[in-house]
Image: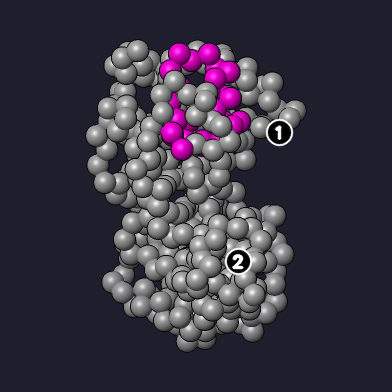
């Protein structure tokens, strides 16, 4: 088929949070390429809130990909009557969903995992396996005839939600944080235990910032990440603002906009912060910042570079457990934070897509 004939396009990118953020510039490129087409996105229900209100999307298919949820997911893709499915997940289940849709054109990466390329009608080569995820996804847009520009902040569209903004300001005001306060957040959690910088190190940085850095420190994370957040708060000798589990996804995005700096492991909030233009200090161990680091300028990545890193493993096999992270010292993070906080005052005005 001719790509010019596309009328109903489905993006299959169910997870995770960071990967969804990385796909936003490709969505924008698809909208420019197919201005009159209906664009839909299949996503896990837990991440659907990130895409709500997206001006480039016509429909969000929020699905449950557990065994019980598969029949409904298959019905959803079939009912869409898509003439083009773009699989950006590159796994067996995402490829099968595209195939089950009945779409005559199914595009995915040639190096997709778990046999996924067998289900595609068109395979897009990836010339450099070490390229950043944002740039890799944009290969798909180029294959379909788009000419995406180098993504700037406007390409990562995360629409503002006035209710979420108001809720965050109320949370901060209740804790005595006024508009204009230098607010720094610590995000001590990550999906893998091997990606977590020691909580004691987070606590030491938080204490220094509140005692000497002129900053108010908040600890953030999801409801399921209570353990790491509680441990940082317990270890701190100064009292941080406890926001772990206190925000919805849209409220987290609003909070990240409000920060001067986010200090974080390799995680979804790291990518959200970079997308809204908040400076990030990112701590990398088993993963590769060249592939999945905070995208764009103005961020600091601390990566020890021990010989076994990046190993991309959820289990550390090094003789010194998590040496890739424990060798990153609190003082390095403090110095990076001091540099960012002393920089030119970041504009806190409203941001639109």
Q: Nearer the viewer, residue 9 or 240?
A: 9
First along the sequence among labels 1 and 2: 1
Secondary structure under tag 2 reads: loop
Residue at horizontal 47 percent and vertical 77 percent from the top = 333
Location of residue 151 in the rendering, given as x and y in whole percent from the top left corner = 30, 46
* Residue of label 1: 66
Residue closest to the far right: 68
Residue 42 inside the magenta-drawn segment: no
| Relative height, residue 291 to residue 178 (above, below) | above
Residue at horizontal 50 percent and vertical 73 percent from the top = 306
Location of residue 222 in the rendering, given as x and y in whole percent from the top left corner = 64, 55
* Relative to 234, 165 lies left or right: left
- Answer few, some or many: residues within 10 Å of disc 1's Cα (few below 14, many 20 plus, some between 14 and 19): few
Q: Give the image quarter of residue 170.
A: bottom right
Please give the label number shown on residue 2: none
Residue at horizontal 38 percent and vertical 55 percent from the top = 295
Location of residue 69 in the rendering, given as x and y in whole percent from the top left corner = 70, 27
Residue at horizontal 69 percent and vertical 21 percent from the top = 71
Q: What quarter of the picture does the C terminus occupy?
A: top left
* Residue of label 2: 196
Q: Give the image quarter of residue 160.
A: top left
What residue range appears in magenta?
87-111
Q: Is residue 164 in view? A: no
Secondary structure under tag 1 reads: loop
Coloration mode: one colour
Location of residue 264 in the rendering, given as x and y in whole percent from the top left corner = 52, 65
Q: Is residue 304 in view? A: yes
Q: Give the image quarter of residue 26.
A: top left
| Relative height, residue 6 to residue 279 (above, below) | above
Q: Nearer the viewer, residue 218 or 149?
A: 149
- Marks 1 and 2 sit apart, C-alpha to C-alpha, by 27 Å
């Amino acid at each position: 088929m001719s790509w010019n004939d596309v009328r109903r396009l489905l993006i299959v990118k169910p997870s995770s949070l960071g990967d969804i953020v990385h796909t936003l510039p490709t969505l924008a490129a698809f909208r420019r390429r197919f201005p009159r087409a209906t664009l839909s996105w299949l996503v896990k229900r837990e991440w659907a809130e990130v895409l709500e209100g997206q001006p480039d999307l016509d429909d969000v298919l929020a699905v449950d990909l557990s065994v019980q949820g598969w029949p409904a997911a298959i019905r959803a893709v079939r009912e869409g009557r898509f003439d083009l499915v773009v699989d950006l997940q590159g796994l067996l289940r995402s490829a099968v969903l595209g195939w089950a849709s009945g779409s005559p054109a199914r595009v995915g990466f040639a190096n997709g995992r778990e046999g996924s390329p067998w289900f595609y009608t068109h395979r897009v080569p990836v010339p450099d396996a070490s390229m950043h995820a944002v740039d890799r996804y944009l290969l798909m847009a180029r294959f379909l005839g788009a000419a995406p520009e180098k993504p700037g902040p406007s390409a990562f569209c995360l629409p503002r939600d006035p209710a979420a903004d108001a809720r965050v300001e109320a949370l901060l005001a209740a804790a005595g944080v006024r508009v204009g306060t230098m607010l720094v957040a610590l995000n001590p959690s990550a999906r893998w235990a091997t990606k977590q910088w020691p909580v004691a190190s987070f606590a030491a940085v938080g204490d220094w910032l509140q005692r000497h850095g002129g900053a108010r420190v908040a600890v953030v994370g999801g409801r399921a990440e209570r353990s790491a957040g509680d441990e940082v708060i317990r270890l701190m000798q100064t009292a941080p603002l406890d926001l772990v589990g206190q925000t919805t996804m849209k409220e987290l995005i609003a909070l990240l906009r409000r920060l001067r700096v986010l200090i974080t492991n390799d995680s979804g909030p790291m990518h959200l912060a970079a997308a809204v233009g908040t400076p990030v200090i990112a701590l990398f161990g088993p993963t590769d910042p060249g592939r999945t680091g905070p995208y764009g300028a103005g961020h600091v990545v601390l990566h020890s570079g021990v010989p076994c890193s990046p190993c991309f493993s959820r289990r550390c096999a090094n003789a010194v457990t998590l040496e890739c992270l424990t060798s990153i010292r609190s003082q390095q993070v403090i110095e990076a934070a001091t540099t960012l906080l002393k920089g030119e005052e970041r504009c806190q005005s409203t941001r639109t897509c």
